[in-house]
Amino acid sequence: MSQPRTDLAPGRFPADFTWGTATAAYQIEGAVREDGRGVSIWDRFSHTPGKTHNGDTGDVACDHYHRWQGDIELMRRLHVNAYRFSIAWPRILPEGWGRVNPPGLDFYDRLVDGLLAAGITPWVTLYHWDLPQALEDRGGWPNPDTSKAFAEYADVVTRRLGDRVKHWITLNEPWVVAFLGYFTGEHAPGRKEPESYLPVVHNLLLAHGLAVPVIRENSRDSQVGITLNLTHAYPAGDSAEDEAAAKRLDGFMNRWFLDPLFTGGYPRDMIDVFGSWVPSFDESDLGVIGAPLDFLGVNYYSPSFVQHSEGNPPLHVEQVRVDGEYTDMGWLVYPQGLYDLLTRLHRDYSPAAIVITENGAAYPDEPPVEGRVHDPKRVEYYASHLDAAQRAIRDGVPLRGYFAWSLMDNFEWAFGYSKRFGLYYVDYETLERTIKDSGLWYSRVVAEGQLVP
Ligand SMILES: CO[C@H](O)c1c[n+]2c([nH]1)[C@H](O)[C@@H](O)[C@H](O)[C@H]2CO
């Protein structure tokens, strides 16, 4: 059990803390038809009229595929000791399984070696939403064969990189993949099939569980985890009804994933709420899904304030917009939600370690003037959330690292290039990167290992 770190002065982080930035393949790489890369569901979705802001696509994005060496220099300027990035499954297995594409593996091999040479530890996310279209054409995540295909993909990647990459994240945010991709259709593949939501969640968690032993076999002595988007659900009022609504939202967003990963099964109360939507599956799946993990990756941006609703079956929950500051995504700035989430995870699930794999904010940054981009709100967002994270460490939470989202402005999925999260500003005409004030501030925090003014 992790002990309180009362030895840490306010604002100071452990000397061995992991400091990083995070990105994802489809959001930054571009080069979508280069070196044998196959088509992903996000290529198909973003090229479908009406699906993304302004019809934006990841065809070029930040052209990281060609600019990766310069981007490593951007990381060095931030003094980070880690970098979280994802591997594009379609670069490795263009049809999703079977035929391996050597140039795809070669790209990530060069990137990993470049990071290590720069003293930056690579943290690899195997799946950050860019499913090969060929697998979607065979049913996609509702098809349990996709879970097996993911394990094969994990095998190919970890055989090649497992000697040098020792930090692996199987999936990024299965809730987003399932709910936005197959329930609301806001994300690729854009399917609106509520009945597919829970089967997709199960197949994603099964894919994760099948991959864990494969990773451990091919990448000895590595740390393996999963990244979940988690929120902290607060009742908007003090009624018992609102308390119950918050518990149902917590079950929907958090416990439906945390319980099978850490306690051996889906939460009973939510099985009753979801009723006939709960898919049938082999009980043996739960043993696979519950494979022990070295860390839990947490993506936190904002909490949820909810109240009971007579509508919105089967959850009967509605979000309440409370007074406060909001980011350009319309997300409430509420750092206490990060503290409350971290201490709750430690109390209720006791993961061996927790890593904040994403935290950051979008604001409508102005283009650089005399080489500067002033983004005071983003500095304040990071400062207040890092303070909450440091308080959680002092109170005993085994928080081992923090990855700022994101290294640079990039393709923000259905929002296209209209939302900027980066520590570096990207001019999408010239692709020039310019460090923002938040990047300068973050580099000082990382260099000193403590919050700075
Ligand atoms: C509620 O926010 C989610 O946890 C979330 C936010 N974000 C994410 N997940 C994704 O992992 C990133 O690819 C996004 O670029 C990033 C910013 O939107």
Image (spheres, helix red, strand yellow):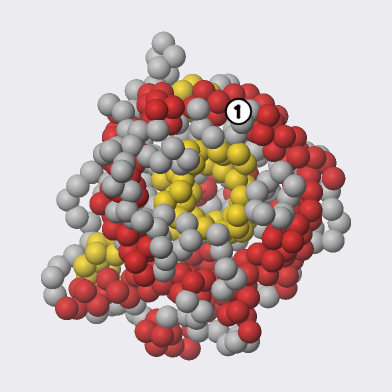
Q: Of 132 and 333, which appears nearest the observer?
A: 333
Q: Residue at x 44, y 14 (%)?
A: 371
Task: Identify whether 102 is placed above or below 367.
Answer: below
Estimate how packed mark 1 is, as few (under 14), some (14 to 19) or many (20 or more) residues with alpha carbons within 10 Å.
Answer: some
Q: Residue at x 55, y 56 (%)?
A: 172
364 lies left or right of 96: left
Q: Residue 379 in the image: x percent, y percent?
A: 33, 32
Q: Residue 368 in the image: x percent, y percent?
A: 42, 18
Q: Residue at x 33, y 64 (%)?
A: 344
112 lies left or right of 120: right
Task: Identify whether 168 is placed above or below 28.
Answer: below
The quarter of the picture where the C terminus appears is top left
Q: Of 364 and 342, which appears nearest the observer?
A: 342
**What SS does tag 1 mark?**
helix
Q: Label 1: which residue?
A: 71
Q: Residue at x 72, y 73 (%)?
A: 145
- Is residue 388 in view? no
- Where residue 362 sits, quadrant-wise, is top left
121 lies left or right of 407: right
Q: Residue 220 in the image: x percent, y percent?
A: 71, 55
The quarter of the picture where the N terminus appears is bottom left
Q: Of 378 and 131, which appears nearest the observer?
A: 378
Residue reaching furthest left?
238
